[in-house]
Amino acid sequence: MRKTVSIIVPVYNEQENIHILLQEIHSYMKPLPYQYQIVLVDDGSTDGTLAQIQLLTQGDTTLRYLSFSKNFGHQAALKAGLDVCQTDCCISMDGDMQHPPELLPVLLQHREQGNDVVYTIREESTNLPYVKRVTSNLFYDLLNGLSSIELDRGSADFRLLDKKVVQQLKQLQEYDIFFRGLVKWVGFRQIGITYQSRERTRGTSKYTLKKMIRLALQGITSFSIKPLYIATYLGFVFSLLALAFVPYVLYSYYFGKAVSGWTSTIITIAFFGGLQLMILGIIGIYLGKLFMQSKGRPLYIVQQAYLPNEA
Ligand code: UDP
Ligand code: MG
């Protein structure tokens, strides 16, 4: 029996890309001795993406899809794809052609060699906007510094996962999913390969600055509680500094200079006001996570699924 593989592609308003993406996937997968299926996860697209997918299923027996009731985000879409995956392995990739389909055979080849996870690392490339490169590197450095997992710079949601890894990931009930970290965290035999990211030729990036900051904060706070400790340390340091201020205050009082010092007072108030807000914010993020998790809401809602025979 031929080995089976699912290719999971989250798509959010990618109507210009789907057609060409499928074409390319087919051209690289057809020659391989695998029985493959493509699972498109429509993350609540508001353009013609879903209609186009539905149309394409008529002429393409490898195509399956899930459609969300609204936009739940890229990570939720990935989770949904994994949840329905029952093949020997799964490959996840973006729907905008930035993850080159010519890598599909390479990923499978590494699995043949006994690896359970084949992840990809985007090479520094001038194809990417400068700001994206800088912010991306900053994010990985920060995350690695703060948490106990070691993520490669430029890790992407383009990877192959063996069935046994998928099995573990399916069981996770985390509200805030950050796959790049989780996949490292589960262990098993892993290997990373590098690739050159392509330019996005059609459509626009769905990761706005707001979504990127959110993902970065999510990633950091999902894998580390160090920011909470840092807040405590900062509190200590500043209390000590404040203590050192006491002799000066007493001196000023006895020598009649008590009213001067307005500037330093204002600066201190402003500085500590900001610091306290920031630390409250950090605590708030963790509290918010607990809150969302405790409600136990599903990560996504599927309004339509097309998964003929075994999914
Ligand atoms: N995406 C999604 N839901 C979202 C945002 C993005 O499913 O809320 C999909 C998008 O269609 C694409 C992939 O996730 O297939 C990566 O998004 P994008 O290319 O916009 O991100 P970038 O490459 O700019 O980081
Ligand atoms: Mg992209």
Image: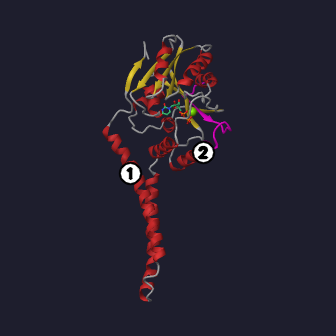
Task: Residue at 50%, 16% (x, y): give it.
Answer: 63
Label 1, label 2: how far apart the Cα atoms are: 26 Å
Residues rendered magenta in the picture: 113-132
Q: Residue 216, image x and y in percent?
A: 50, 44
Of residues 210 and 9, the one drawn nearer to the viewer in this rendering: 210
Decide: marks 1, 2 in contact (CB < 8 A)?
Answer: no
What is the quadrant of residue 170 in the picture?
A: top left
**Secondary structure of residue under mark 2:** helix
Task: Residue at 52%, 32% (x, y): give it.
Answer: 188
In this rendering, the answer to whether 209 lies above or below 89 is: below
Query: Dot 2 surroundings within 10 Å: few (below 14), some, or many (20 or more)?
Result: some
Of residues 117 and 221, the one drawn nearer to the viewer in this rendering: 221
Task: Residue at 53%, 24% (x, y): give it.
Answer: 15
How many numbered markers are drawn?
2
Residue lying at the far right in this picture: please name it: 126
In this rendering, the answer to whether 13 lies above or below 234 is: above
Kind of residue at disc 2: Asn
**Which residue has dot 2 on it?**
137
Q: Quadrant of the C terminus?
A: top left
Residue lying at the far bottom in this picture: please name it: 255
Q: Earlier in the sequence, mark 1 or mark 2?
A: 2
- Can residue 87 be seen by looking at this rendering? no
Q: Residue 213, image x and y in percent?
A: 50, 45
Tell me, for residue 284, which label it has, or none. Answer: 1
Q: Residue 121, image x and y in percent?
A: 61, 35
Kind of residue at disc 1: Gly
Q: Residue 93, image x and y in percent?
A: 55, 28
